[in-house]
Image (cartoon, rainbow, N blue to C red):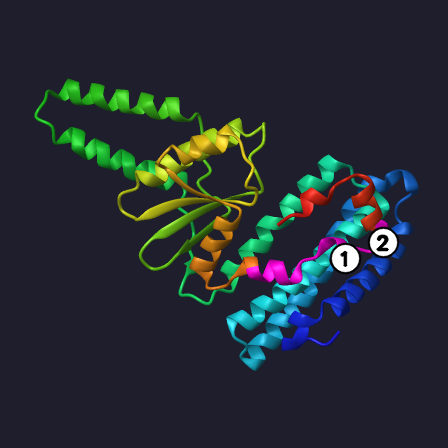
Amino acid sequence: MNVDRNLKNNKTGLLAYFRSRANEIVSELALQYSAADYKKKASALNKAIIQSRDNLLSILEETARAQNWTNREVLECVLMITYTNDVVMLESRNAVWQYDYMAFSRRVGELWEPFCKLCFKHPSTGISSFIPPLFSEVKESLTTEIVTYIDGLTIQTHEKAQLRRYYDKVWGLVTSGEIQLECDLHFTDGTTKYIVDFKSGFGSNEKGNTNRLLLVGSIYQNIETENYKCLIFVRSTENNHYLTTLQNSGVWDTSCGPDTYSKIHQFTGFDIHNWIENNIDWMNDFAPRMRDTITRNELQNYLIW
């Protein structure tokens, strides 16, 4: 496998490479797992195929640095490596443990987020990542702010103490522990800090996640020392009332389907939707056995990115 700038166009070569690697991995795992241990074997297979991808990406990044590739050149190669690896990973897992519709839809949805995030790892614009704040830090800052305000009031000392107790009660109602402020992606353009949550789609079991996002978004909105903006990027255009709740909250700016890709293009300078249209062709890129599984179980709709 030659690692050069033309790798972005070498879909056929990459598919052959990863399939050969997968065959080697399957042969090794056959010595470790029996047919009854197909679940453990599938898990080990996925991890090994991902490791094969990461090894190739590491060599690609070394080559790119040595030859001064542009971010766009790196990104186009990384996207092709990632996509072809995903194709082979799905095929290989299906050969060991055949997908049903629930497992397949969930897995394809899981692959979409890290694929889109690659554009933010290799942007053509001036954005950069930042470390999100810890909840303990935010709580301490807000507590200091409110205590300073209370101490400055022209009221009796016992009244100030009572106000502090009420404030502590409010925190107790909000949470009994720490809140995870880290989301899927955090980047800044130098003026605004963006908090991004990726979702393949909003289904019937999103109540807990929706409530958490509302709380997290509200906390970011109340951090006055920084200019934060919370974004939700959704793959599907068919969602339910949980997304509507977030859209109407005034806390999260939401995008779905093509609008999500437009946002990614805006922030990173790369037209990921155009790349997907021109390069991703799951059904024709899958091996015959995988295509048969998809067709027989009517799973084609889950492959729409």
Give the camera-side residue of 173 and 228. Answer: 228
- Image quarter for residue 75? bottom right
Mark 1 neighbour density, 10 Å: few (under 14) some (14–19) many (20 or more): few
Q: Where in the figure is residue 19, as x and y percent of width and height?
A: 81, 61
Dot 1 corresponds to which residue?
284
Residue at far bottom of view:
67
Does the magenta run of residues contain 178?
Answer: no
> Residue type at mark 1?
Asn
> Residue type at mark 2?
Pro
Mark 2 neighbour density, 10 Å: few (under 14) some (14–19) many (20 or more): few
Could you say which disc has been placed on residue 288 in the image?
Answer: 2
Q: Which residue is drawn at 46% across and 38% down?
A: 180
Secondary structure, mark 2, is: helix
- Image quarter for residue 99? top right
Q: In this view, does 259 lie to the left or right of 109?
A: left
Residue 178 can be seen, yes or no: no
Q: Where in the figure is residue 120, as x and y percent of width and height?
A: 50, 59
Does the magenta run of residues contain 282?
Answer: yes
Quadrant of the snapshot with the N terminus: bottom right
Q: Residue at x 52, y 50 (%)?
A: 258
Q: Residue at x 72, y 58 (%)?
A: 85
Residue 202 position (above or below residue 280):
above
Q: Where in the figure is residue 28, as x and y percent of width and height?
A: 87, 56
Give the camera-side residue of 90 and 23. Answer: 90
Give the camera-side residue of 128 and 254. Answer: 254
**Residue range (magenta):** 274-289
Residue 214 can be seen, yes or no: yes
